[in-house]
Amino acid sequence: MPLGCLKPYLEGARGRYNTHLFIMEVNQLLSQTNDYLSSLGYPSSPELLYRPVEYALEAGGKRLRPLFVLMSYGLFADDYERAMPCAAAIEVFHNFTLLHDDIMDNAPLRRGRPTVWNRWGENVAILSGDAMIISSYSLLAKAPAHLLQRVMECFNRVAMQVCEGQQYDMDFESRQTVEQSEYINMIALKTSVLFEGAIEIGAILGGADEQNIALLKEFALEFGLAFQLQDDLLDSYGDSRLGKSVGGDILEGKKTFLMISALNSATDEDREALGTICHDNSLTSEQKIAHTLAIYDHYDVKTRTEAEINRRFEKALNALSKVEANADALATLREFVEGLMNRDK
């Protein structure tokens, strides 16, 4: 996979690096990650078990989580090959969660292609997903023996928290009200902890001390919250360049940070409208989105969401600024996340 989907984000980076050279630096890590994933060589038989695994990994994506492993490792060491199996494990696990999420969400497309369940059926997607998590553990087992237990403990904790986050997300679908604090906790579990785990595993492998690991975990947790809130915002206020249909969260009636903010401020009439628009068959999809956005705009939801994104990201950068590590590697990581947060798609 070429730089492709990462380039627009990285061009938003600013600071010490020449943008072109910075993109080349990150793209080298991305290329090495993709080469390693391609080299895993899953068996050809049974085809309906392994072909969907390859199909899911071939679809690409931004590879943020393995890049976080490698960049965190690079803060304290420079032989990236040593961290590559664990970086790949995090990416395989992430894609496993997507296979199962797509079944639960009844999602027909992922990254512009039919989802695994849509192409091969739910049973195949479930079993291939199971094979992917086993593959993740096989890759993690390649960590140095003296660090293996700690790496596994981190991964097991994160994997269970991701499952907890997914369950909370499903629970919210049937609830009339969800507090903002509950939503933040849910996305922390569903999204942020995997960034946190990636950063922690990279730092462990690189030989970081406990203080630096704690700061990096705080950085990753807050960055993950900011990144997910940004994704929520772009789903409603982005454009077609986002890579998915804008307004999808609105049409599904999802209780995002934006929806919860509006519900908490709305009149009874607007609150009722927000709860029923997505189910109103007399409205087109465009009308449902436009009507919801009009209510969002009335209650200044976009501005409030942007403020929360900025608050979380500033906390992330503040934690990162306290890390004691290779200065150039720290600058690269900072440039990387600034580019991600300056995206408009």
Image: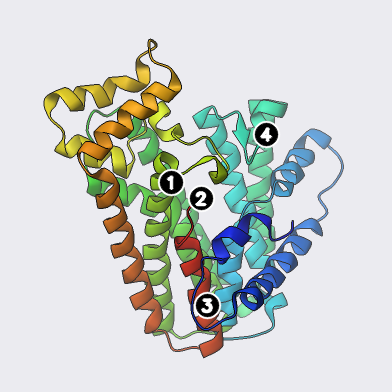
**Relative to residue 69, is residue 117 depicted above or below?**
above
> Quarter of the image holding residue 212?
bottom left
Per the rendering, the mark at residue 7 is none
Say which element carries label 2.
loop
Secondary structure of the residue carrying tag 1 is helix
The answer to whether residue 141 shows anywhere in this view is no
Using the numbered discs, state the Cα–Cα distance from disc 3 to disc 1 in whole angstroms. Answer: 31 Å
Looking at the image, tell me whether mark 3 or mark 1 is earlier in sequence order: 3
Question: Which residue bears the numbered disc 3?
Answer: 203
Q: Nearer the viewer, mark 2 or mark 4?
A: 2
Which is nearer the eye, 292 or 62?
292
Residue located at (83% from left, 36% from top) = 47
Give the amino acid type for the residue marked by disc 1 in the picture.
Leu
Indicate left or right for 159 with 141 as reference.
left
Q: Amino acid at mark 3?
A: Ala
335 left or right of 41 in image: left
> In the structure shown, which secondary structural element does the residue marked by tag 3 occupy?
helix
> Residue 317 sits in which quadrant?
bottom left
Dot 4 amino acid type: Val
* Coordinates of residue 335 in the picture (x, y in percent): 51, 74
Q: Which residue is mark 2?
A: 345
Q: Secondary structure at mark 4?
A: helix
Q: Nearer the viewer, mark 4 or mark 1?
A: 1
Camera-side residue: 333 or 122? 333
Measured Cα–Cα span from mark 4 to mark 1? 25 Å
Kindly report which numbered mark, 3 or 2, lies closer to the viewer in this rendering.
Answer: 2
Judge from the rendering whether residue 291 lies leftward or rightward of residue 3; answer left or right: left
- Asked if the residue under mark 2 is in contact with the one under mark 1, i.e. CB atoms within 8 Å, the reply is yes
